[in-house]
Structures are given as C-alpha cells and as structure tokens.
Image (tube, grey):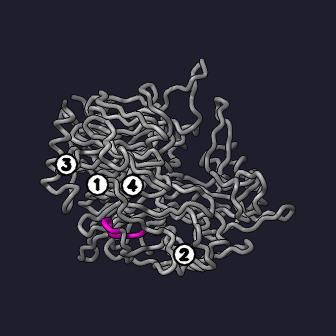
Amino acid sequence: MKIQKALGFLAVTLLLAGCGHFGKSDPDAGDWPRYARDLAGTRYSPLKDINRQNVSSLAPAWSFRVRPKGGGALVSSATPIVIDGVLFLPIGNAVVALEAHTGVEIWRHKVTNGLARRTVSYWPGDGDYEARIFYSNGAAIVALNAETGKIDETFGEKGAVELKVPYNAPPTVYKNVLIAGANTAEMQRGDPGDTRAFDARTGDKLWEFHTVPRPGEPGHETWLDEGWKDRSGTNVWVWYMTVDEENGMLYMPVGGPSANYYGGDRPGANLFGNSVVAVDAQTGALKWYFQTIHHDLWDWDLPPPPVLVDIKVEGKEIPALAETGKNGLMYILNRETGEPVFGVEEKAVVAADVPGEWYSPTQPFPVKPPQLSRGHWTPDDVVTADDTNEDHVAACHALLDSYGGAFFNAGSFTPFFLHEEGKPVKASINMPHNGGSNWGGSAADPNTGYVFVNTSEGGSIGWIEKRKAGGDYGRGTQDSTQLYDRGSLSGPGAYSSFSASFEDEKGQKVTLPCIKPPWGRLFAIDANTGEIAWETRLGVSEALPEDKQDTGTLNTFGGPIVTAGGLVFIGATNDHQFRAFDVETGEELWSAELDYHAQAVPITYRGEDGRQYVAVMAANFGATPRGPDGRPLNNESLVVFALPD
C-alpha cells in the first residue's frame, strides 16, 4: 500500500535526522506537516514552482466535498496537513486521509463522542511506536495509526487520553510531548484554563501549567481579594502553539479571564491573562511572560500564538517573535527573554464608572510597529455617500442618532460606562470590534524578516448594565452570577457594532460598517525595523457600485501563508475570493472566485506527481443553504489549485 511505504520511510528518516526528536526539525520541502507548517509557526514554504511570474495561470486541480462524503459540521475553518504525498483532514464526524495530488480517499476514521475540528497533528513515531495522527473530539485526545486510520490502542486507554477540561483541537507536537490548551466556559467560576502536556508514546501526563497562578507561584500577587479562586477562562483556546526548537521554549497565547466584560470580582492585572507565556516545553517550567492587556474588559484575548522569526536590528541578530491580537497591536519581543525589541510604553487609559470595577491605570503600547487597526473614532469617521451610498449613510446616521448623536471614545482600551434604565444614554465605541488580528494570525518569511498579517476594522458600541434575568449575554452564561455585563439598544450582550443595513437593487439586505473604509487590510511588517513595509486593502464589497467596491472587508477568520516563490496566499474575506499577493510590493497577482468563503488558513505542498499544490477550505459561514426538499446542501469543500500540466 502506497501510504505504508511513504509514512514508514518518513518515520525512519525523521528519527535518523532528528526531526521531531533531536535538534531543529526542518520539514521536508514538499510537506506541510502541521497547522502552521513548522514549530516556529512561520507558514513559510520553500516551494517556488508557483511564483510571481506564473501564478496568474493557477487553476483548480481537484476538490473534496465534505458532506456528501460523510462529513459533519464545524469544519469550515479546518486546515489539512500533508506528509509525503498524503493529506490528512478533519471533517467533523470523520478524519480522512487523501492522495494529496488527486483527492482520492485512502482511509476514513469515524469520530465518536464529539467532532474533529480545525486540524490534526502528526507524530513520526520512534523505534517502539508507529507514526500517529492525533485529533481531539473535545473530550479526549485520540491516536490513529497514520498508515491505516485505525485507533492505535497502545496510546493511553485504548487509544485515547481523557481531558478533564475539554480542548477542541489536536495537541501541539514537540519531540515526544503533546501539548494541549483548554476550552472553558465563559462563566467567571468554573474549570481552569490550564495548559497540559502528555507523552506522545504512552499518553501519560507530563506536566500542567497554572494559567491562573496559585499562592506561592509567580504572578499570584496580580489577583487581589482572592479573585483567583476557581477562576475560569485564562486559557489557550487556539488550536496550535509555537516552539523554539533551539531553546526548547513553548510559547502560549493565553486568553483573558472570565467573565469577558466585568472584572469587579477579579481586581488586579490578572496574570497570566492576555499574555505570551514562555515555558520549557519538556517540563512546563516558567521562563518568562509578557502581558499585552492588564485586566481585560474587552474580550481582547490573544487568539493566535506568536510567530517566530530571526531579525537583525542595527547589525545585531535577535531571535524574535511577533504577537498580534484583536486590538491590532503587534508586539515584537526577544523570544529568549521576553524583552520588547523596539520598546513598549505604559500609557494612561481612561476609567469608567461601573460599581466595584477595577480599572488598570495604564496599558502597554508598542513603540513600533504602529497599530494595525484604527483605535480612535470621531464623528468625522462616519461613512459618506462617496464611500458607500445614500441609503447606507442614512442608516448609519440613524443608528448614531439613536445613541444621542455621539459615542464616547478615548482611543484603544476605551471603557464602557454604566447605563441604568431611564437614565440618559452614554454609549462608548471601542475599536476595533471583533477585528484587529484574530485567530488567523501571522506568517513570516525567515529570509527577509517580514511578518504578514491581516486585520479588520469596526466599532463595538454600547454600555455596561446590570444583568437582566433571561438576557442573552453570551455563550453559556445564562447561569452567571456576575452583577454586570455588556448591553446596548439592541438588548443584552456585546453584539452591537457600528454597522448598518440597506437593501440592494435585488432587495437583499446588505450590512456594512459605518466607519470609513478600509475595513480590511493585509500588512507586511519589516520586523527588522518595526516599520510597515507595505499594506493593501483586502477584500471587496460587491454590493456597492464597481467604483466603490475596493473597501477591504472583514477578514476575521483565516490568515496568510508565504512561499519562496514570492507569494502570500490568503482567503479570510467574506467575498468568496482566494488571493495571491506579491511578497515584496503587496500587489494582488491572482484571485479565484469560490462557491463559498475561504475562511481558513491555506497550505501549499508537493504531490506525489511532483507538482506544487495550494489548498484551502471553503465554506458558508451564514445560514446553511437548503434544497427544494429542505435538506441541507453541501457547503464545505477543500479546494485545491495547481499550474496546468
């Protein structure tokens, strides 16, 4: 069987070369063996068959439709991996192995007791254990034999390790260590968001890192009035982490503590919330940390892990990392020490008036790069008819007028004020709303030190109110005992953005932001200088007249990859387009229109036939389309491109 020969040879090669076991493991040039391709998270491929000169000829090669093949749900943001010509993909209620050059199915494993989402992990095995594919169904890490797709019962208990706290993603694999984050509820009290590590051979637990420090642990002093007790959130919820293979450090992007918008019961800066935390990947011992937000009140946790890149600053080589978040700030740090490369300033920020709330007097702002999403707003930022159309402008002003004709804004970290029934409205607009850089994260070119990242724009509007019985304040929070939460004229919850709707010529509802474009951008940051090398608008608004469509669009879901062919590939937008940009200039060189949105991180690899391929999952993030019989239509496909033969 082809896969047996391929994977067996690869496991031996990796063992002898030290890949995945000793020293630094550079993936085979034609492989994409993990979510971000390498442990550094660069998403950089050395392949250059597809390049700036010929990318315009890129065409569909094959596709794999998920649902007709027995897939499930929630796989729309999945990213496959490829090892030696075999592509592995989670499709909800199954994991499949496909020929990477044809899409022909090799094996299929049925997932039980949950769903396999986002991606899978590969471990090459050793002298005693065969190569494995790991996935999580949320409740457990499951090991499959990479050749057959059968459960490998030599791992854990009959092939699985139970996770007492769920993690809806496969583990990060480093040498013989599996590292798992946590998916916690958004209640202030509940399961801890601790990071855990297991032996990739046996499933034995190796270590656990307390993301909310306990008495006697570093950072415990940042939790006042015993706010640390039973604290939930403060978790790594994203589906991969990064590792420096030379120093053995694991970099964890720890999210904010629960509850998201009220912290009166957790006074203090709340380490290790909203922090990049570096630990020894083998032991979990703390090395250093850097907190990007003190006492988060905006749900601005760190969705992506940092990307690792070596840079040269004033002639000095620095092992660096770049971390971005939902507020559009990028922190470039020395990854060995956590020290900012270009400096960070603690700037005073405004406090609001919610009873019992603890407001940090300052927040950390990097000196460089500049903020990649707008943080300030004034009434002059409202769209005009030159930007969109008269109907949209009128709807935006009507929304603004409903809040008294103005929003409070003091730049990034604008707080939300208390609103009481019957009292005048004082609503804030905090920017960006669900924007900045989300879980799509960054890519980096190790040859130039350029970091590529997509960002979105928008404004979150509203206030803080006393929680109302039965109000929908967010996922799984109906039983929360917290006193206050977000609200707006639309009702309970943090759902209101400064956006408004109009009907297009076909009578269809179109909703667009009420701030002036651009609404989405792709950046290249020169990490050697901290400066923006180039930026370009990302996405078009097709509901607008052709001469106004170049607005950039929200691109919250998905991120870029970069290749030695001088290309940045990215989907992420909500306009059905998958694009390639010139790595040096930001010029758009190619695009393909898909049936659905390419809101996932793409990959590129070499197939068994020797050709380079580019693949991305495309899905409909809106309501599930249905046929005349009422049955759901397929709306998820892996779409694969190549140059013509």
Mark 4: which amino acid?
Tyr
Count residues near mark 2 (Cα–Cα under 10 Å), then give few for <14, some for 14-19, many for 20+.
some
Residue 278 lies in magenta, yes or no? yes
Q: Earlier in the sequence, mark 1 or mark 3?
A: 3
Give above or below for 89 relative to 270: above
- Checking the image for residue 28, the label placed there is 3
11 vs 174, left or right, is left
Quadrant of the image containing the C terminus: top left
Among the 4 quarters of the image, the one containing residue 413: bottom right
* Residue contact between numbered discs 2 and 1, judged by CB atoms under 8 Å: no
Residue 393 lies in magenta, yes or no? no
Q: CA distance from mark 1 to mark 4?
A: 11 Å
Query: Marks 4 and 2: which is nearer the front?
Result: 4
Q: Where are the magenta residues, as a range?
A: 277-283
Under circle 2, the secondary element is strand
Query: Marks 3 and 4: which is nearer the front?
Result: 4
Under circle 3, the secondary element is loop
Give above or below for 452 relative to 5: below
Reading the image, the residue beneath label 2 is 363
Q: How far across and down, in percent of the image, does residue 457 sit? A: 55, 55
Q: How far across and down, in percent of the image, does residue 54 sit? A: 25, 39
* Residue contact between numbered discs 1 and 4, judged by CB atoms under 8 Å: no
